[in-house]
Image: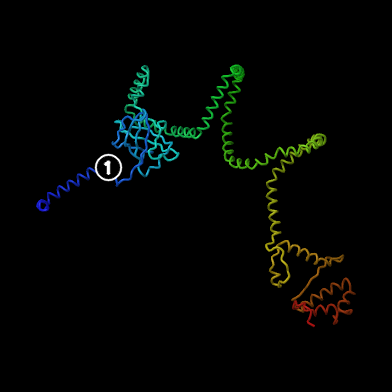
Amino acid sequence: MRLAIRKHWRDFLAVAGLMLLAAGVAIYILSQQGLRFPLVEETPKHIAIELQDAQAVQPGQGQSVRVAGVEVGRISGVDVDDGMAVVDVELEHSYEKLIRQDATALLRPKTALKDMFVEVTPGTGRVLGEAGRISVANTLPDVDPDEVYAALDSDTRPYLKLLVEGAGKGLRGRGADLREVFRRLGPVHRDLARVTRATARRRMALKRLIHRYGVLTEYVSRRPDDLRRLVSASHAVFDSLAGEGENISTAVARLPGSLRATERAVSEVRDFAPALQSALQSLREPIRALPATNAALTPFLEQTTPVVRNRIRPFVRAARPFTDDLRLAARGVGEATPDLTRSLEETNRFFNIGAYNPGGAESLGGLSTAQQRARNEGYLYWLAWTSQNGVSLFSTADAQGPWRRVTICGVNPAILNVIIDGVLKYVNKTDPGLVGSLIGAPGSTILAGSPIQNLLDTGFGTCNFNAPAP
């Protein structure tokens, strides 16, 4: 055999190449037909979908299962169970946890030739297990147009035919206009979608409404006499309203403005609602305590009632004429209040600046002179210090005039002599005897040991007033 292969190796390679090409084509065709190759692809998850009618469902034809337009699996089989069609579905491994127990399924055609697919809404419940089923209550089959036509009676069918033919003639060549109409209906459809979503979110409230309406109608049906009286009274009310037609028209004309004001108020209240809810939650405990509070207040109110009736009420009636004058004054005060408030705020800032003491009260004990001078005691401290020194400055004032104590230092002795000479001349005019006691003897010569000479000898030229060392 080896010899034959060596002789015909070209033919052998051609045959082997054809076999490989045939195997590749076969694998491609089988993969496009949905065949899963064992040991290569993971085993898919199988679930079943119950349908009333599985017409045109053909396993092995690539019919898919989709969620929101995305293919998540394929139809692998169809069977009949207790009069219902059961469609077997293979889910991709990556989507095996997508389908839930409350999922819904719709059988829909992909083309006019009934190339079918299953559109699934995953649901929100628990994950549907292996071999789980979506019940027939959560599925809808495909509906053919002839079924709709067959559901109509013999009188309606000709009218439907005329409607379709007339629509075809009227819309012939006007596809762009029809597309524009549908485009302009887009906002309407969006609003309708919002309404339906809001209704779906309130399905429990709608269910309660329908139930209570049924209870109400049943209750009314058992009381025909009451219903008859209600109708008679309503007739009288409507007769009265008919006579007020003009007034009602006026009220209706004013209603839009009132509704706009109400809408604005409701919008503001909507922003206030979260805070109001928190406040009401906080008020629960005080409200629960109200009965005990009322019981405790009852004796006090019984005692104060005579006082209010016999004293406060007569006083209020007597003071009422004066309150009219107060109303005028209060109006002026109300207009001035904003400016007064700002003035008081600035005044408060002024006093805050005066009272500000960053270091607080600081003791002088153990501090050097430089540290004592470096203290920051605030303005109030220095204001008190200034007031005390001012009182000390003017403490020598008498009937002769507001004399103040003056300390002179660092003055040249010649200048100091001129100043003292001027003072002595001024004193000599008013009290010559005082001059003699100041200089030590009558005349103009300053004697040693006199008050003036002692003053000159104390060191005014150096500002050194310390006592000499012993």
| Residue 40 rendering spot, x and y as whole percentages | 29, 47
For the residue pair 389 and 422, the one nearer the viewer reads as 389
For the residue pair 265 and 320, the one nearer the viewer reads as 265
Mark 1, residues whose alpha carbon is within 10 Å: few (<14), some, or many (≥20)? few
Residue at 27% from the left image edge and 42% from the top image edge: 31
For the residue pair 444 and 264, the one nearer the viewer reads as 264
For the residue pair 267 and 328, the one nearer the viewer reads as 267
Which quadrant of the view contains residue 463? bottom right
Asked if residue 71 shows in the view, the reply is no
Relative to residue 86, is residue 249 drawn left or right?
A: right
Which quadrant of the view contains residue 209? top right
Residue at 90% from the left image edge and 74% from the top image edge: 433
Relative to residue 18, is residue 204 drawn left or right?
A: right
| Residue 369 rendering spot, x and y as whole percentages | 71, 72
Q: How many marks?
A: 1
| Residue 445 rendering spot, x and y as whole percentages | 85, 81
Residue at 68% from the left image edge and 46% from the top image edge: 338
Relative to residue 462, is residue 217 drawn left or right?
A: left
Name the image quarter holding the C terminus: bottom right
Relative to residue 126, is residue 213 drawn left or right?
A: right
Say which residue label 1 marks.
31
Q: What amino acid type is highlighted by mark number 1? A: Ser
Asked if residue 440 shows in the view, the reply is yes
Secondary structure beneath disc 1? helix
